[in-house]
Image (tube, grey):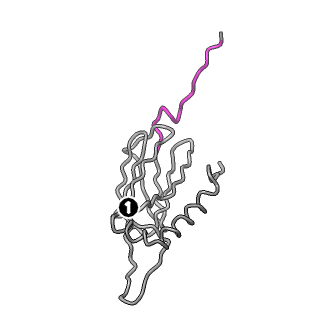
Amino acid sequence: MAIVHFEAFPHIDTLHRQMNRLFDDLGFAAAVQERGLSNFVPAAELEETDEALVLRLEIPGINPDDLTVEVMAESVSIAGDRQSTAQTTENGATRSEFRYGKFQRVIPLPTRIQNTKAEAKYENGILSLTLPKVEEEKNKVVKVAIR
């Protein structure tokens, strides 16, 4: 199965970067960070096989111990906090395009899964969840009556 990157609005990333630069130039970035209003949302990828769903999230720079993963039968919730490690000296300044702050993402699943058998692995900044499908979903065959 091929993975296709979906872009509903192809120019939204460019617009987002331009708006961030404008707010940075006006000094809003520090105020937003002070108030904890970060809009960090990790990118996700969902792959479906016959046996399971494989959900991957791109969350570099976060200690796995600082993540909370909750798996329900029909959705997955991931929460965490990416802390800034930049130190600003008295005479210097730090400019960053990295996004920091708390995040929570709830991802609905296309089929029911066995949440008690979910497995997680965190490697190279990628959180991978293997979510086995419920037995009925794996063997789902629908017989159609002919009239």
In terms of secondary structure, where does tag 1 sit?
A: loop
Q: Is residue 111 above or below residue 79?
A: above
Residue furthest to the front: 26
Is 143 one of the magenta-colored residues? yes
Residue at point 56%, 41% (across, down)? 50
Q: How many other residues sit within 10 Å of disc 1, few (<14), some (14-19) or many (≥20)?
A: few
Q: Is residue 86 above or below residue 122?
A: below
Name the foreground residue: 67 vs 83: 83
Q: Is residue 133 above or below residue 22?
A: above
Residue 115 appears left or right of 23: left
Residue at point 49%, 73% (across, down)? 25
Residue 145 appears left or right of 74: right
Magenta stretch, main secondary structure class: loop
Residue at point 54%, 49% (across, down)? 46
- The part of the chain drawn in magenta is 132-146
Name the foreground residue: 18 vs 143: 18
Residue at numbered disc 1 = 37
Name the foreground residue: 60 vs 38: 38
Q: Amino acid at mark 1?
A: Leu
Name the foreground residue: 121 vs 70: 70
Residue at point 38%, 77% (across, down)? 85
Instruction: Report the quarter where the C terminus lies.
Output: top right
* x, y percent for residue 30: 39, 71
* x, y percent for residue 79: 37, 56
* x, y percent for residue 42: 47, 59
